[in-house]
């Protein structure tokens, strides 16, 4: 049975095989890679273990999907296909079993908070007993995995570089929450393959069915922003480092505002602070030794963004960073130079919309009308952000601007360029935050 020794923990083209051995077993469909935490894992932190298919031992396996068996593709061709399919991998050699690295977090679509196979019974009870208070009516339900990938796309287009790379992938694992029927079918097919190989070889898939979801690269050395912000209050940062923090914070503001993140608290964005030795040559265990202080932000947990309307029911879903001292400082010239040329260009905004369309339309329940509403909200956010940057406003003033919706104007005549209509949302949530 073939397997590869692979350098641990990288993304896409950064992962290169260091060794490949020939030979495949009959009917082998790909690698197995054990993974990460998911909504039903029941672990405090993400986990990752890997093994080649069929390896004995206490492995939790995730099947990699290939278009055809490895015996037909060949080892290196299969690996190249996987890399092009946005999967990340780590060492699967048994010799690396004591030094596995976390490489990512996978969130299956049907195990999201409002998915049909979500393992959290509290959400099921809420849906059963309080259907009127279930979900967020401003969001497209069960589309969190696309929101995660969409936030990464916006981050890359704007060159913000604060969202860990996120893609939509298909994975299968015994630890995922499957229906009883799927598990029985999987066991039956495996039994048929063992007892009657000629019959088992006719099955298109032997294992559990793959799940679609978002796969986000795991970032190391980061802590919750709430932890560091409290610490920075007691131990003020040097002026240059504080400037770095402010510039990174502005990027977070830009991202959250454009995608209208409805779930941004100070516990779901991260800060990494690499601090130098103090004058006595001693450092706290929380610090990492470097020559100069370096501070970075990571915007994770973007699954509740891209609403189809501004919140107008019970809750306002505010940006909690708006209460931070950094939010009262006007936007810097650096963020203006980075963002304004892009969002002021209609062609750039149009390209962004088209890229999001190509991503969102992959969902089986994709609705073009709902997507246009989501884009109308995003255009309005971009319009407000453009004005705030030009006027030298602060993030706090930005979130106080009236919510705008910019829709494509309907016309009976075809024109070379699209026209838009702008409207303000007058209805406010019952529990307003201003």
Image (spheres, rainbow, N blue to C red):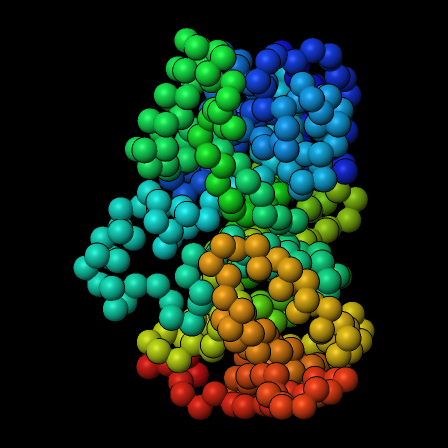
Residue 308 placement, left or right of 417:
left
Seen from the viewer's position, the closer of residues 17 and 402 is: 17
Who's the residue at 70% across and 86% down the image? 414
* Residue 185 quadrant: top left
Give percent across and percent down for residue 302: 53, 58
| Residue 308 vertical placement versus 303 (above, below) | below
Seen from the viewer's position, the closer of residues 195 and 167 is: 195
Residue 267 placement, left or right of 386:
left
| Residue 204 vertical placement versus 394 (above, below) | above
Give percent across and percent down for residue 181: 32, 33
Who's the residue at 59% across and 13% down the image? 26
Q: In the rendered view of the protein, which quadrant contains the N terminus?
A: top right
Give percent across and percent down for residue 103: 61, 36
Residue 333 placement, left or right of 25:
right
Residue 155 placement, left or right of 187:
right
Who's the residue at 73% across and 12% down the image? 22
Who's the residue at 47% across and 77% down the image? 309
Q: How many dots with numbers?
A: 0
Give percent across and percent down for residue 287: 63, 42
Residue 245 visible in this rendered orientation of the protein: no
């Amino acid at each position: 049975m073939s397997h590869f020794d692979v350098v641990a923990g990288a993304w896409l083209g950064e992962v290169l095989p260091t060794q490949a051995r020939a030979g495949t077993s009959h009917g082998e469909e790909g690698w197995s890679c054990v993974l990460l935490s998911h909504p039903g894992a029941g672990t405090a932190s993400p986990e990752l273990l890997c093994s080649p298919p069929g390896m004995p031992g206490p492995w939790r396996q995730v099947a990699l999907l290939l278009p055809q068996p490895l015996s037909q593709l060949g080892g290196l061709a299969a690996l190249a296909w996987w890399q092009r399919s946005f999967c990340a991998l780590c060492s699967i050699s048994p010799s690396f079993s004591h030094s596995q690295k976390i490489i990512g977090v996978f969130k299956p679509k049907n195990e999201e908070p409002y998915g049909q196979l979500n393992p959290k019974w509290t959400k099921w009870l809420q849906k059963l007993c309080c259907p009127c208070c279930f979900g967020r009516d401003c969001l497209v339900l069960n589309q969190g995995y696309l929101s995660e990938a969409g936030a990464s796309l916006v981050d890359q287009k704007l060159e913000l570089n604060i969202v860990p790379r996120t893609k939509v992938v298909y994975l299968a694992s015994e630890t995922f929450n499957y229906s009883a029927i799927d598990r029985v079918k999987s066991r039956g097919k495996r039994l048929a393959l063992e007892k009657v190989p000629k019959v088992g070889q006719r099955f298109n898939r032997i294992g559990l069915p793959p799940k679609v979801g978002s796969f986000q690269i795991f970032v190391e050395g980061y802590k919750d922003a709430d932890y560091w912000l409290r610490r920075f209050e007691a131990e003020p940062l040097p002026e240059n480092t504080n400037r770095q923090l402010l510039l990174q914070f502005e990027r977070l503001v830009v991202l959250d505002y454009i995608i209208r993140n409805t779930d941004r608290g100070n516990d779901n964005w991260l800060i990494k602070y690499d601090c130098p030795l103090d004058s006595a040559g001693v450092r706290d265990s929380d610090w990492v030794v470097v020559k100069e202080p370096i501070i970075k932000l990571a915007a994770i947990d973007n699954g509740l963004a891209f609403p189809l309307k501004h919140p107008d029911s019970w809750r306002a879903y505010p940006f909690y960073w708006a209460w931070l001292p950094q939010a009262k400082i006007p936007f810097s010239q650096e963020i203006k130079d980075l963002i304004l040329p892009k969002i002021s260009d209609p062609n750039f905004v149009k390209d962004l919309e088209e890229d999001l369309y190509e991503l969102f339309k992959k969902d089986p329940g994709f609705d073009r009308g709902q997507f246009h509403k989501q884009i109308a909200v995003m255009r309005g956010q971009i319009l407000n952000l453009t004005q705030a940057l030009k006027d030298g406003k602060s993030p706090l003033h930005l979130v106080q601007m009236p919510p705008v919706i910019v829709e494509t104007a309907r016309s009976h005549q075809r024109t070379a360029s699209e026209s838009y209509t702008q409207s303000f949302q007058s209805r406010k949530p019952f529990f307003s935050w201003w």
